[in-house]
Image (cartoon, rainbow, N blue to C red):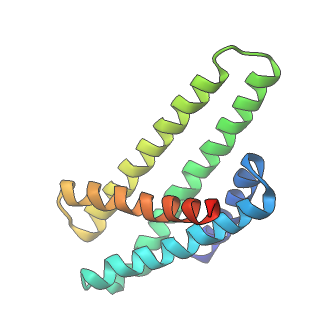
Amino acid sequence: MWKTVAFYLISGCIVEGLISDPADGSLEVFLRTIMAFSTVATILLVTKKWRYYNQLFTAIFVCENFIMTLATATEAMYFGMVMNHHDAAEEISIALGVFLVGWYIAIVSYIFRQLLSFQMSLSIMLAFSYFVLTYGIPMLFMDI
């Protein structure tokens, strides 16, 4: 579990450092990690399935790491397109970003459905809520 968290922190700081100021990006990654710990803990406490904490957290963070790696590749591709003056660089990058977010929500929803035996609608709703809590709140905090 801790290896996946360490990889997430390192790759997240790299990705956020490429997007914005490295200090702000690192702080946002740490806030997302804290929100992930607390959100997973809250879901498991409410459902009384605390025994799955390590499994759920590791599964979600392996997903996060995979998507973060693809996001890093997307940023590298965007940089290459900008340097080669590709006209549709922004549109392609945005489309890939939207695809990665949708894929992320689908994977996390599948993890909730399989590990915690939730119905599909509940798992999709929880996955979307998890995404908003772990990415949206730290982003709002950084904008304040």
Q: Quadrant of residue 74?
A: top right
Quadrant, the N terminus: bottom right
Please state the horizontal and vertical placement of residue 43, each as a whole percent of the image. 33, 76
Residue at horizontal 66 percent and vertical 22 percent from the top: 89
Please state the horizontal and vertical placement of residue 58, each as a whole percent of the image. 49, 70
Give the answer, above or below, for where 15 lies relative to 77. below
Quadrant, the C terminus: bottom right
Q: Pick out the residue farthest to the right.
A: 83
Q: Is residue 52 in view?
A: yes
Residue at horizontal 79 percent and vertical 55 percent from the top: 21
From the viewer's side, name the closer residue of 48 and 115.
48
From the viewer's side, name the closer residue of 53 and 40.
40
Q: Quadrant of residue 27?
A: bottom right
Q: Pick out the residue farthest to the front.
A: 144
Residue at horizontal 70 percent and vertical 30 percent from the top: 78
Please state the horizontal and vertical placement of residue 127, each as a whole percent of the image. 35, 58
Residue at horizontal 42 percent and vertical 74 percent from the top: 39
From the viewer's side, name the closer residue of 70 and 137.
137
Q: In the image, is 125 to the left or to the right of 93?
A: left
Labels in figure, total: 0
Please state the horizontal and vertical placement of residue 10, each as a whole percent of the image. 73, 63
Q: Quadrant of residue 141?
A: bottom right
Give the answer, above or below, for where 48 lies relative to 115. below
Q: In the image, is 58 to the left or to the right of 30?
A: left
Q: Is residue 10 in view?
A: no
